[in-house]
């Protein structure tokens, strides 16, 4: 690299760090210092400098079907997760899913008395990570090729486990290899939404400390999971259920041809307000909860829920969240409502609207849900639960 390019890389890195601080993704001066130090361009050598220092994911690999399976993560997500992890000097950290960049940042944060081990299932990824880490001066990061579902027992116990691939469950090995009092930060997919959740290990279970919206490529190997995606209209509208919702009925393909009913809730919000917590509340309170997806071009559902709308289904009916411009409010405000099709639509719409109003009155302005994870067979307190292969997620709302 020429001296001019090196200078430009330094300037772009400083600008990216300033941007992440200004937007609130970095809130800790030690994390900011790590971002100012680690040369991201060395971890994405195929990207031009301005791309290497944009707040954007850099895709590294797709599978034969064209699905992204490896990337160097978006700096703002990396920063938020490092904030959640709160790595201290001397910590022993395990990263699941390697790209090199995040491991180097964590190596800066652990300092000379700590350690970082990173594991990836894909030998192409580990070979590249090993090479670029050495190139950037982080050859003391241990890079392991293995299925991260089983952790890396040789380095356990860890003070921190940072998972950088979407998981559906907490693998037993992660629980075993995390010391009591240690923290795991993991992007968890629950009912069609992915949140990075920071959990502390408290004796026999994990207790959430913070959550943030995120998106990652999906886990492969023994921890891979699937979502049941069922078409309900000829023009590419689908409903999705989680693996543990095997017994939930889904409506027939064509249900959207039934006349549409509509009920408005009176709940008004800014278009930009995330629906994440509302959707989870609906998942917790409505039987037959699922997520409805439609391509942007699909006219059947209005407005088109491209990223997935909270929905509720029976064998012959479906209801799903929608919105319309709010009357007598600025253009950025919408009112939430529910559309429904099929013989049960009236009942489904009524139940959904009731829960939207309850969430608005009691939880919308509160601290949001908390999450606990218990191993199979443990005594789990009452509340909304999602049973997974290895454990049980309990989700509760203060008050
Ligand atoms: C988003 S990338 C990781 C990004 C990286 N931490 C960085 O520094 O930007 C996710 C990685 O997880 C890996 N992966 C998927 N399933 C895995 C598994 N079961 N065990 C370990 N790695 C896995 C993929 O090969 C991919 O390289």
Image (tube, helix red, strand yellow):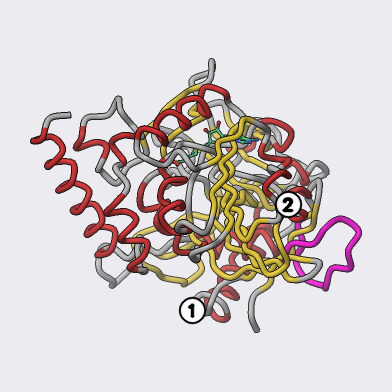
Q: Residue at x 78, y 50 (%)?
A: 172
Closer to viewer: mark 1 or mark 2: 1
Residue 156 drawn at (x, y percent):
70, 51
The residue pinned by badge 2 equals 288
In the depicted structure, whether residue 334 falls above or below residue 55: below
Q: Residues within 10 Å of mark 1 (few under 14, many from 20)?
A: few
In the depicted structure, whether residue 342 falls above or below residue 268: above
What quarter of the picture does the N terminus occupy?
top left
Mark 1: C-beta under 8 Å from nearest atom of ligand 1? no
Query: Residue 210 falls in which quadrant of the image?
Result: bottom right
In the depicted structure, whether residue 377 falls above or below residue 153: below
In the depicted structure, whether residue 268 falls above or below residue 73: below
Q: Residues within 10 Å of mark 2 (few under 14, many from 20)?
A: some
Query: Residue 137 falls in which quadrant of the image?
Result: top left
Residue 71 can be seen in this image: yes
> Left or right: where does residue 35 sit relative to residue 310?
left
Residue 350 can be seen in this image: no
> Left or right: where does residue 361 sit relative to residue 387?
left
Disc sitting over residue 365 in the figure: 1
**What span is in magenta?**
372-386
Ligand 1 occupies quarter: top right
Q: Residue at x 56, y 77 (%)?
A: 363
**Residue 378 is inside the magenta segment:** yes
Residue 207 drawn at (x, y percent):
68, 69
> Left or right: where does residue 285 sit relative to residue 22?
right
Which residue occupies the foreground of this view, 305 or 387?
A: 387
Report the Cα–Cα distance between label 1 and label 2.
26 Å
What quarter of the picture does the C terminus occupy?
bottom right
Which residue occupies the foreground of this view, 87 or 329?
A: 87
Helix, strand or loop for disc 2: loop
Going from N to C along the chain, the mark reached first, 1 or 2, is 2
Residue 395 drawn at (x, y percent):
69, 66
């Amino acid at each position: 690299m020429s001296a001019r390019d090196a200078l430009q890389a330094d300037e772009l890195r400083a600008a990216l760090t300033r941007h992440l601080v200004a937007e609130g993704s970095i809130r800790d001066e030690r994390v900011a210092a790590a971002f100012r130090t680690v040369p991201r361009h060395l971890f994405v050598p195929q990207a031009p400098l301005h791309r290497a220092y944009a707040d954007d994911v850099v895709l590294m690999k797709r599978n034969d079907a064209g699905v992204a399976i490896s990337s160097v993560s978006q700096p703002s997500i990396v920063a938020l997760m490092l904030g959640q992890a709160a790595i201290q000097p001397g910590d022993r950290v395990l990263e699941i899913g390697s790209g090199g960049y995040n491991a180097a940042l964590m190596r800066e944060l652990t300092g000379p008395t700590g350690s970082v081990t990173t594991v990836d299932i894909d030998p192409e990824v580990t070979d590249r990570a090993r090479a670029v880490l050495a190139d950037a001066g982080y050859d003391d990061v241990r890079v392991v090729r293995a299925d991260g579902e089983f952790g890396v027992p040789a380095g356990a116990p860890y003070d921190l486990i940072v998972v950088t691939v979407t998981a559906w469950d907490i693998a037993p090995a992660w629980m075993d290899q995390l010391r009591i009092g240690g923290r795991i930060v993991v992007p968890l997919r629950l009912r069609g939404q992915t949140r990075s959740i920071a959990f502390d290990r408290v004796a026999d279970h994990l207790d959430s400390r913070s959550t943030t919206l995120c998106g990652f490529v999906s886990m492969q190997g023994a921890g891979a999971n699937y979502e049941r995606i069922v078409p309900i209209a000829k023009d590419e509208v689908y409903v999705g259920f989680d693996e543990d919702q095997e017994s939930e009925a889904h409506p027939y393909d064509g249900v959207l041809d039934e006349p549409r009913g509509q009920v408005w809730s009176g709940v008004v919000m800014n278009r930009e307000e995330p629906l994440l917590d509302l959707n989870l509340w609906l998942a917790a309170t409505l039987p037959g909860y699922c997520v409805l997806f439609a391509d942007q071009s699909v006219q059947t559902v209005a407005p088109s829920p491209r990223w997935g709308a909270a929905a509720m289904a029976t064998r012959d009916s479906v209801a799903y969240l929608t919105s319309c411009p709010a009357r007598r409010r600025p253009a950025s405000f919408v009112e939430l409502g529910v559309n429904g099709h099929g013989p049960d639509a009236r009942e489904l719409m009524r139940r959904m609207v009731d829960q939207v109003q309850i969430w608005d009155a009691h939880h919308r302005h509160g601290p949001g849900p908390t999450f606990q994870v218990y191993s199979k067979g443990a005594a789990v307190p009452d509340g909304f639960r999602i049973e997974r292969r290895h454990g049980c997620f309990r989700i509760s709302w203060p008050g």
